Image (cartoon, rainbow, N blue to C red):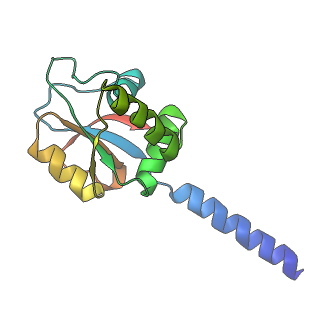
Amino acid sequence: MKSRCRILTVLIFAWVATAARAELVVVVNPANPADSLSRREVVDLFMGRTQYFADGSLVLRLDQQPQSQERQDFYRGLVNKSVAEVNAYWAKLLFSGRASPPQVVDGNKAVLAAVRDNKNAIGYMDSAAVDDSVKVVARVD
């Protein structure tokens, strides 16, 4: 009986942890003309395939810290890759001189501040941390 209770407790905690996982959103400055971005556009921007928004303005891409849950979930949901795999991808691009990786910032508050202060910034964050200083243009599952 005790082992069944332990198993049930573990299953409940696992379910709660999964249910509590935050939804990630991609945000831009409210002055940015983009109202929404397709999944392909987000992939192209964050994987260095393009450096410009559709209006031709240069993009300032923002990444969260490598060890953050947001970064892990973002790249897993966006391109089904781990942070280590994404870092290896960027190392190849950087070495070839084709692109440079996104600027790393420290957490949701830093994403908010950077996007709020730069019309060309784009970042991702926990949807629960979004306020009216940014505009949500995509969601990542």
Q: Indicate whether 129 appears above or below 8.
A: above
Residue at image location 31% in from the left, 23% down from the top: 98
98 to the left or right of 55: right
Residue at image location 45% in from the left, 33% down from the top: 89
Residue at image location 72% in from the left, 69% down from the top: 10
**In this view, which residue lies farthest toward the right?**
1
Q: Is residue 50 visible?
A: yes
| Residue 107 x/y as whole percent | 30, 58
Q: Is residue 133 visible?
A: no
94 to the left or right of 18: left
| Residue 71 x/y as whole percent | 42, 49
| Residue 117 x/y as whole percent | 9, 46
Examine the image and state in which quarter residue 129 appears. bottom left
Examine the image and state in which quarter residue 32 appears. top left
Residues 81 and 99: in front is 99
Q: Indicate whether 38 appears above or below 135.
A: above
119 to the left or right of 77: left
Residues 141 and 82: in front is 82
Examine the image and state in which quarter residue 47 appears. top left
**In this view, which residue lies farthest toward the bottom?**
2
Residues 76 and 130: in front is 76
